[in-house]
Image: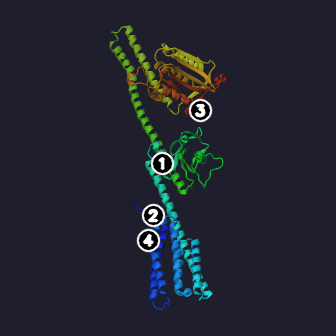
Amino acid sequence: MATPERDPLVSYRLGAVRVGVLITLLALASLVAFRLIPGHGRIPTLPYIAILVAAASGAAGVRLLPWDRLFAGPGGVRAMYAWSVLDILLVTAAVGFTGGGGSELFLLYGLTTVFFGAAYPPKGQVGLLAFTFACYLSVLAATGWHLGAGVVFFRCASLGMLAVLVSFLSAQLIRHINSLTEARTRTERWAELLKAVAASARRMTLDSGAILDGMVDGVVGLGFDAASVSVFDHETVTFFITNHRSLPEDYVQSLHSAREDMPALVRESGRTVVVDPSHPPDQGATLPLRDRGFGTMIACPVWVDGWLAAALVGFSQEERTVSPQDVEAFELLASQAGLALQNAQRFEETLRSVERLEELDRLKDDFLATASHELRTPLTVIMGSGFTLEQQWDQLDEPLRRELLQAMNKNAKSLDTLIASLLDFARLGADSVAMSARAFPVGEAVGSVVSLMGMLFDGRPLTVECDSDLMAVGDPVQIERVLQNLLWNAAKHTPAGTHVTLSARADGGRVVLSVADDGPGISEEELRHLGERFYRGGDLNARSTKGLGLGLALVKEILELHGSALEIESQVGIGSRFAFRLLAAKPDDEEAAPTQLSRYDATATQGRP
C-alpha cells in the first residue's frame, strides 16, 4: 500500500531539524577541539563542560522528539522555538565564560541566526534576533564593557544583516514550496475529478435510465453531497426530478416551475450557474434547497441534439468555493452524459426502425398472401366458367349458360375493383398527384354515398345526420371515396344489428364528417396499425372479409392531400368512430373556380384554423 506524500513545508522543516542537530554536533566537536588547542585563553573548566553536556543533551533530546507527529499540529513549530531559545542561552553562557564581550564564541550567534532565519516566519525571526541582542548585551553588562560601542554595534548589525539575507533566501524557498504545494493540490484535485468523470463514463450504457444514474453518481464522485437530474418540459414551463441522490423526498416528488430554482437559472442563461461564497445568488432568486442547509450549488445544462433537455445539479452542505476545475469537470460530465443520451436515443430510434422494418416485412408477406388469395379466387371462377362454356356450350341449357356468364362477370368486376384499388393507391402515393379542390355542398356528397352504399346496411340501422346548408372545401369525388371506404369498413367489421351513424356538422371554421358505430370496437394493438398499407386486422386464416388492406391507407392519403387527417377513436365492446375535418366554405363560394391541391399545398395547410 503506497504511503501518502508528505507536505513539502513539513518536509522542509524536518530537514531544518536534521541539519540543526548536525550543526549542533559539529559545533560541540569544534568547542571540544577549541578547548584542547593552545591559545584559547582562560576558560573555566567546569562551567565549560557543563555547557557542552547541556548542549549535547539538548541535541539528543531534539533528535528523539516525534517531529512527524508534532508537525501535524502547532506543536512542532513551538518545539523549534524552544530549541532555538535554549541554543541562544547556551551560546550566551559560553560567550560569558570564555571572555565576555571579546570572546571568539560570539560567532556561534551567527549559527543560531542562520537557523531561525531559515526555519521561522518573519515575526519569529524578529523576536529571536531581539532575544539574541538582549542576551549578548546582558553578557557585556555582566562581564564588563571591554569593547567599544562601535564594535558592539557592528557585531549586532552583522547579525541583523545575516538574518535578513537568510530570511530572504528562506522566504523565496518557502514561497516556491507553497507554489508547488498548491500546484500539486490542484493537480491531485483535477486527477480526482477526471477519475470521477471517467468512472461515470464507464458506467454509461445505451440505457437512458443507467445514463441518468451515472450522471448523479458522477456528481457525488466530484465531491458534492447531493445531486439531481432535472428534466425540462418546455411546453408547460416546468421541470421534474428523474434521478437524484440525498435530496429531500418532498422536493423530489414535486413538479417545479421552470422559472425558479437552479434549473431555471440554467434554462434562462443556457450555461453553467454557480452559487457559492464567491458567487452569491441574485436578489429575489428562489432557491428552496438553500434554506435546507445546502450552501453551495452548481447547475449545468445537458444538451441533447441541440435541445436543452435537462439540468445536472450538484449540492454541497459546506459553504465552499467551487473551483474552476470543479466547474470544468462538472461541464465535462454533463456534456458526456448529453452525448450518451443522444446515442441512446439514436439507438432506440434504430431499434424501432428495425422493428418497423420487420413489421413491414410481415405486412408484405401478409399482403402477398392476401393478394394471391383475393386475385386467384375470382380468376379461378372466371377460368372455370369460361372453360365450361367453351367445352360444353351445346350441352348446357340457356339458364345455366346465363348463370355461368353472370358468375364470370361478377368475378371480373371483383377483380377490376381490386386492381383499381391498387392503381388508385399507387397514384395517390406519387408526389406529383394533385386534386381539384372547390367549395361543394356536403349534403349532396353524403346523399350520393348513402344511395350507393345503402344496400350494405340491410341488417344494420344506418342513421344520417347532416345539415342541409353545410359547405366544405375539397375534391367532392375523393371525399365521397373516403366516406365510401369508411362505410364499407363499418359494414364489413361489425355484426348484424350494429347501429351505424354517418354525420356532418360545423365546428368553428371546419366541417367534421364522421362514421360511428356501436360494434365490437378495436383492440389497442390493432388500433395503432390502422391506416398502414396492407394491414388487415385479425388472424389471416380466420378472416371472413375480403380486401387488400388498402382502404384506410387510401383514406389517409386522400385526407393528407386535403390538409386533414383521419381521427380514430375506439373502445372494445363500446364501438368505434372515424372522423376527419375539412375547411368550411360559404354557399356563395360554390361558383368560385376550383384550385389544385398538391401534396405540398396539403402539407402547408395542415394545422391552419
Q: Is residue 432 above or below residue 28?
A: above
Of residue 382 and residue 501, the one placed in the foreground of this image is: 501
Local packing at callout 1 (Cα closer than 10 Å; few below 14, some 14-19, many 20+) is: many
Which mark is on residue 607? 3
Q: CA distance from mark 3 to mark 1?
A: 44 Å
Closer to us: 552 or 112: 112
Q: Amino acid at mark 2?
A: Glu
Nearer to us in this view, 467 or 402: 467
Which sits earlier in the primary sequence, circle 3 or circle 1? 1
Residue at 48 percent of width and 48 percent of height:
217
Regarding mark 1 in the picture, which secondary structure is present there?
A: helix
Mark 3 or 2, nearer chain start? 2
Indicate which disc, 1 or 2, sits on the residue closer to the N terminus. Answer: 2
Residue 358 in percent (x, y) is at 41, 35
In the rendered image, residue 307, in percent from the top left (x then y), is placed at 55, 44
Q: Amino acid at mark 3?
A: Gly
The mark found on residue 64 in the picture is 4
Q: Dot 4: few (<14), some (14–19), or many (≥20) neighbours within 10 Å? A: few
For the point 52% across and 34% down, the residue is: 431
Spatial CA distance of label 3 from label 4 is 90 Å
Q: Which residue is mark 1?
A: 217
* Quarter of the N terminus within the rendering: bottom left
Q: Residue 84 appears at what percent x and percent y?
A: 52, 75
